[in-house]
Amino acid sequence: MQASSRSEPVRFAGLSDCGRVRANNEDTIAFEPALGLAVLADGMGGYQAGEVASAIAVQEVRARLGSALADDAAAGSLEQAVRAAVDGANEAIYATAQRDPGCHGMGTTLVLALFADGAVMIAHIGDSRAYRLRDGCLQALTRDHSLVQEQVDAGLLRPEQARQLRYRNVLTHALGVETHPRFELVRHPLQPGDRYLLCSDGLHDMLSDAQIAAELRRAAGPEAAARTLLDAANQAGGLDNISIIVADCPPDSCPRSKSCPS
């Protein structure tokens, strides 16, 4: 099992910020270029418990996937490795919450991207998101596990209405709050020049998809993209912690001619 970044490097950059309102940052991010792995978690819970949950999630995923990817002969499929890593992270958070009264009730979102074998494996739970910018067109690769998203899916709310609701961040699924959480895992083929974004709700609550797309199109590289998105979210209010990872696939030599559908 070989990560694509070893032969076709994916460029990563990431930033995490408290925002302009919160006193502490409960988000955790990490990326491992040698493994083609990016992980982002947005914690929730009592005093400092959210940051404990997000840190455990990222640490467990990095350790478990790192071990699986290093053991090519025995690692099995990528999907099995990712599922085992997410399940292991959930078990570690849940066990800590049960053992430590100060962490009772803590949990975290999770979104990860693993670039391997000409594809990207996206796993997510909660309302942290993954997006893809391809040929200038932005597409959400995840669907929020939230009460508001369920109402949108049922036709009870329009997406533009959902953005205005105070309870838009009430989650229906998260890591660490149940023994067998429901998370999504999808594989997407890569194309040269793709740009991927992982982000917490501190970004997508502050900026519309159209604003996110505009910033991603303008930025020359992943570092510039992460910085401009972070600055834009803070300028829009910075009401929550803001975390961003941008991953760029190597461009090909052919000019892009496609345009976004209207």
Image: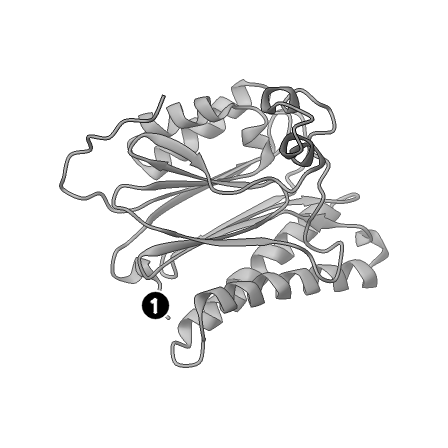
Image height of 150 relative to 117, above or below: above
Q: Name the residue type under label 1.
A: Gln
Question: What residue lies at 53% left-to-right and 40% top-to-bottom?
Answer: 129
Total numbered labels: 1
The one of 148 and 51 positioned closer to us in this rendering: 148
- The answer to which quarter of the image holds residue 126 is top right
Residue 31 in picture, x, y percent from top left: 45, 52
Question: What residue lies at 36% left-to-right and 36% top-to-bottom?
Answer: 133
Q: Is residue 211 left or right of residue 61?
A: left
In the rendered image, the quadrant that contains the C terminus is top left
Question: What residue lies at 42% left-to-right and 31% top-to-bottom?
Answer: 227
Residue at the far front: name it: 155
For the residue carrying disc 1, how many other residues have a C-alpha within 10 Å: few (<14), some (14-19), or many (20+)? some
Question: What residue lies at 45% left-to-right and 28% top-to-bottom?
Answer: 229
Residue 248 in picture, x, y percent from top left: 32, 43
Q: What residue did someone put label 1 on?
A: 2
The one of 25 and 126 positioned closer to us in this rendering: 126
Residue at the far bottom: name it: 73
Q: Is residue 32 visible?
A: no
Q: Is residue 147 left or right of residue 243?
A: right
- The answer to which quarter of the image holds residue 83 is bottom right
Residue 107 in picture, x, y percent from top left: 72, 50
Residue 54 in picture, x, y percent from top left: 64, 50
Dot 1 falls on a residue whose secondary structure is loop
Q: Is residue 46 visible?
A: yes
Image height of 97 relative to 133, above or below: below
The one of 16 and 7 positioned closer to us in this rendering: 7
The one of 192 and 8 positioned closer to us in this rendering: 192
